[in-house]
Image: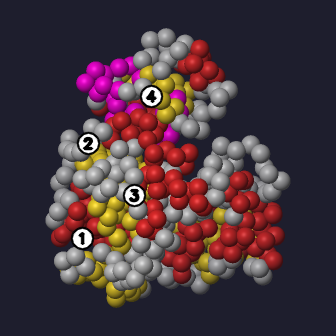
Amino acid sequence: MYNLDFSKPLKIFFLGIGGISMSGLAEIMAHKGFKVYGSDRLKSDVTTHLEEKGITVYYGESRSHIADDYDLCVLTSAVKENNIEFTAIREKNIPYIYRADLLGQIMKQYPNSIAVSGTHGKTTTTSMVSEVLMANEEDPTLLVGGILDSIKGNVRIGNSPFLAAEACEYTNSFLSFFPSVEIILNVDEDHLDFFKDINDIRNSFTRFANLCNTSGCIIINADIPDYKEIVKDAKCKIITYGMNKVNSYGETNDYYPENISFSASGHPSFTMVSTKDNKKTDFELSLFGIHNISNTLSVCALSDFFNLDNEKTVKAINSFGGTKRRFEYKGTIGGVTVVDDYAHHPTEIAATLSAAEKVPHKTLWCVFQPHTYTRTKALMEDFASVLSKADKVVLADIYAARETDTLGISSETLAEHIRNLGKECYYFPSFDEIENFLLENCINGVLLITMGAGDVHKIGENILGI
């Protein structure tokens, strides 16, 4: 693999520079003195921001974008073999690495590199870590998989030993990282277009755990089934947290909550117990959902590991209202409250709908856009089961993302499964039809959640006129 010397900046090209992760890496490399270029399909707010930073961005797909004098090219795993620009890169014999490899090499530059992993919750938890580090004036470098208001984007470039970034398991990307601290939030069955099964996924997380710096630590959710199997060979300190005092191994977790309650608006409050020092800390979250209590425990464990100020940490967590597309309040019209959420896996959907139950409403409508044919087919029954927790379900077409094969299924297939469970479910092939249906049928007291990893958020925004 190509190894970068960060003391000798080069001319570097990013294929797909407008992606949420690629754009952050491009900005960091430009800050470190590299001459950065890139291409993307369409102009966006992200690419405009990069251009304002002095980065050259080309649009569309063309061989002309690949100059002979590029020293290195960076790709994402989504780039296809027949991509015109990728073909030109290989024909010109320009060295190339993948996004995860570059992030791993960047991590090496930071003694306190924090990698937040898990099948779900990475963006919210990384954002919480970010807020805590900034509140403690640690001047961190941050790479978040969503838009964080406090840094006005998805990246912050600091000048300290701290770096916090999301660590995604898809295509084993996080196995290219060099973390000093790992957070492992959960390990569920997902990305079955790459992994064979849950055991294959668990094996990937086990290998990830073994990468942790020996002087660092792994903060792991002890609610993960057989969590010890994942960290059994790790050579660093292991810190546990969970929603119960005692985990499945009969051991007391290092961090756990007690006295959980919810405000009238649906926000959770609780007392966190730290067993190592018998410390008890009260929290009143601005986030929704009991799952964010679990996320909070992991961040507090991190704060304690680095001996950060407890009062500043608590204040930062309590005031954190979330990132874009994570139970994001979009507006209210005609007595209908519109919320948008990125949930696209059954576990995430269950957590979001559970959070919604605590928010005052008369009827809960869920507009869901399935994400990828592979995931939808593999988890069809699980999707039907969790979606049936809403009072009424509306399905949009499956968002194909990187896939082209429909595998013989559609959103109508999922709708049939939901109806077989006795739930009212509608399917419409276009956003216009969905919007018209909602405008005619949603009445005062409805909580309307648009949900999915695609562009389903546009439905709620169009209804609100924003």
Structural distance between the alpha carbons of marks 3 and 1: 33 Å
Q: Which residue is mark 2?
A: 110
What secondary structure is found at the residue carrying circle 3? loop
Q: CA distance from mark 2 to mark 3?
A: 24 Å
Q: Nearer the viewer, residue 447 or 336?
A: 447
What span is in magenta? 4-30
User: Circle 4 sits on which residue?
Assistant: 1
Name the one closer to the observer, 141 or 448: 141
Task: Please identify the residue farthest to the front as the structure is shown.
Answer: 233
Of labels 3 and 1, earlier in sequence is 3
Q: Please, what secondary structure does the residue beneath circle 2 have?
A: loop
| Residue 42 covered by magenta stretch | no
Q: Earlier in the sequence, mark 1 or mark 2?
A: 2
Q: Quadrant of the N terminus?
A: top left
Q: Position of residue 357 (x, y in %)?
A: 54, 81
Q: Which residue is rendered at x = 58% and y = 73% of the image? A: 350
User: In the image, which is nearer the foreground, mark 2 or mark 3?
Assistant: 3
Q: Is residue 22 visible?
A: no
Task: Tell which circle, 2 or 4, labels the residue nearer the N-terminal end.
Answer: 4
Whether residue 436 sits left or right of residue 453 in the image: it is right
Identify the amino acid type marked 3.
Asp
Looking at the image, residue 226 sits to the left or right of residue 113; the answer is right
| Distance of label 3 from label 4 (alpha carbons) | 26 Å
- Read off the residue under disc 1: 314
| Helix, strand or loop under label 4 | loop
Q: Quadrant of residue 255?
A: bottom left
